[in-house]
Image (cartoon, rainbow, N blue to C red):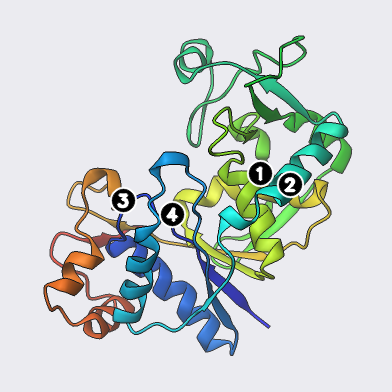
């Protein structure tokens, strides 16, 4: 059975890009007689606002979508800690105290998401107290051997997690114990997700997630990275850029089902385009 999910973080309201992503995941499950899940990714420290989860549910109902809700990330802190302890026990994590500014200054290679961490702390006898923990990708790949994964739009992919450097799996911030990479990999396995549906901006992350699945002996799903909605400047819609919220549209009396139908048919609001 196909199981998809929509997993928003309650650190800001949903916008049109979220609506498109939720509709894609919902329809892929519906068209295959599968299940569409809602998971609230609420471990983003002080940025997480519990009240927004209720708004998210109202927004999805307004769009005419039906879902099953699964446990929020905040219920799985112990599972993330156990996974990190397993990787640490196998010598695959190392502590890192570098700041973003230090990484940017020292990096000589640009990856999909910016400067690639130059492994400054790898092999150092660093104090782990209060440090972030990074995955030693080279050592991990040496142990797993070549890996691949499949995307429904892009086809078979050779896993190349090294393109982004050694990712942080456990953050310095005690309020946000697990990074996106670790948490979402554990969550998707726990929720039985078989088709990971998300935007093309997260395509590079799937290389890392495939590696983590192998290391932690987790099921390997299929991926579906959909195109992104772009604003008039050609940038993806984002909370930090003040993209109009679904809640504002909903409260203004706009017809949510009509918006869903328009997005399904490719009829986009003025100034919005669909990327590759």
Classify mark 2: helix, strand or loop: helix
In the rendered image of this protein, does residue 81 appear above or below residue 55? above
Classify mark 3: helix, strand or loop: loop
How far apart are labels 2 and 1 at the CA level? 6 Å
Q: Which mark is residue 9?
A: 4
Q: Which mark is residue 208?
A: 1
Q: Quadrant of the N terminus?
A: bottom right
In the rendered image of this protein, does residue 214 appear above or below residue 167? below
Q: Which mark is residue 10?
A: none
How far apart are labels 4 and 2 at the CA level? 22 Å
Q: Which residue bears the numbered disc 2?
A: 212
Closer to the eye: label 4 or 3: 4
In the rendered image of this protein, does residue 58 appear above or below residue 237? below
Q: Residue shown at 52%/88% (left/top)? A: 31
Closer to the eye: label 4 or 2: 4
* Residue 34 point in image, percent of width and height: 60, 85
Q: Which residue bears the numbered disc 3?
A: 236
Q: Residue shown at 64%/13% (left/top)? A: 120
How far apart are labels 3 and 1 at the CA level? 22 Å
Marks 2 and 3 in Cβ contact (< 8 Å): no
Q: Residues within 10 Å of mark 3 (few under 14, many from 20)?
A: many
């Amino acid at each position: 059975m196909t199981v998809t999910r929509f997993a928003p973080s309650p650190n800001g309201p949903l916008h049109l890009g979220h609506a498109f992503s939720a509709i894609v995941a919902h329809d892929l499950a519906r068209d295959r007689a599968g299940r569409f899940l809602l998971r609230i990714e609420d471990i983003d420290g002080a940025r997480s606002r519990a009240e927004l989860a209720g708004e998210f549910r109202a927004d999805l109902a307004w769009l005419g979508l039906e879902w099953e809700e699964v446990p929020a990330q905040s219920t799985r802190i112990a599972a993330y800690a156990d996974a990190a302890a397993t990787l640490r026990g196998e010598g695959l994590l190392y502590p890192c105290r570098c700041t973003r500014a230090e990484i940017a200054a020292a990096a000589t290679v640009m990856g999909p998401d910016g400067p690639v961490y130059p492994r400054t702390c790898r092999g150092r006898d660093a104090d782990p107290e209060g440090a972030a923990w990074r995955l030693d990708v080279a050592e991990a790949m040496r142990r797993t051997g070549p890996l691949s994964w499949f995307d429904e739009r892009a086809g078979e992919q050779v896993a190349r997690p090294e393109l982004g450097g050694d990712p942080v799996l456990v953050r310095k911030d005690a309020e946000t114990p697990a990074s996106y990479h670790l948490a979402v990999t554990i969550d998707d396995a726990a929720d039985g997700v078989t088709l990971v549906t998300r935007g093309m901006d997260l395509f590079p992350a799937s290389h890392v997630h495939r590696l983590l699945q192998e290391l932690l002996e987790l099921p390997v799903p299929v991926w579906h990275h959909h195109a992104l909605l772009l604003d008039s400047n050609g940038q993806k819609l984002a909370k930090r850029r003040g993209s109009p919220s679904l809640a504002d549209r909903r409260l203004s009396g706009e017809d949510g089902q009509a918006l869903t139908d328009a997005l399904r048919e490719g009829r986009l609001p003025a100034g919005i385009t669909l990327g590759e």
